[in-house]
Amino acid sequence: MPGPSIWDLKPWWCQPWSILLTGLLGIAASWLVWQRWWLTAAAAVAVLLWWWLFLVLAPEAYHRSRGSS
């Protein structure tokens, strides 16, 4: 029987919906503040890396550490 999901152990501000919303707001804010596509693109790349780390790699590592396949 599998244990709890990684998201069951996280607070509300560290759930997938809040991570996605914060990233989107960050990208939008970068455009509103700088209005330069290349700065917004850099912000978007940083957000995409952040999403990959917290929404893909961390759950996979947790899943593997629990001995599940």
Image (cartoon, grey):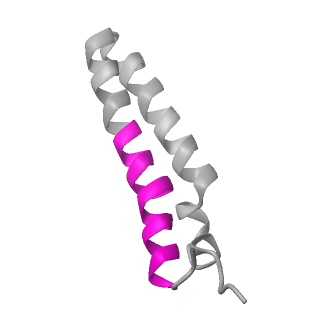
Magenta stretch encompasses residue 16: no
Report the span colored magenta: 48-66
Percent of width and height locating residue 34:
30, 16
Work out whether 21 lies above or below 59: above
Q: Quadrant of residue 32?
A: top left
Q: Residue at x 55, y 44 (%)?
A: 20
Q: Nearer the viewer, residue 44 or 3?
A: 3
Q: Which secondary structure type mostly characterizes the magenta part of the structure?
A: helix
Q: Residue at x 43, y 64 (%)?
A: 58
Work out whether 21 lies above or below 33: below
Extreme-front residue of the structure? 69
Q: Nearer the viewer, residue 16 or 57?
A: 57
Percent of width and height locating residue 5:
63, 75
In the picture, which quadrant includes the C terminus? Answer: bottom right
Q: Residue at x 34, y 10 (%)?
A: 35
Percent of width and height locating residue 10:
56, 73
Q: Which residue is drawn at 50% across and 43% down?
A: 22
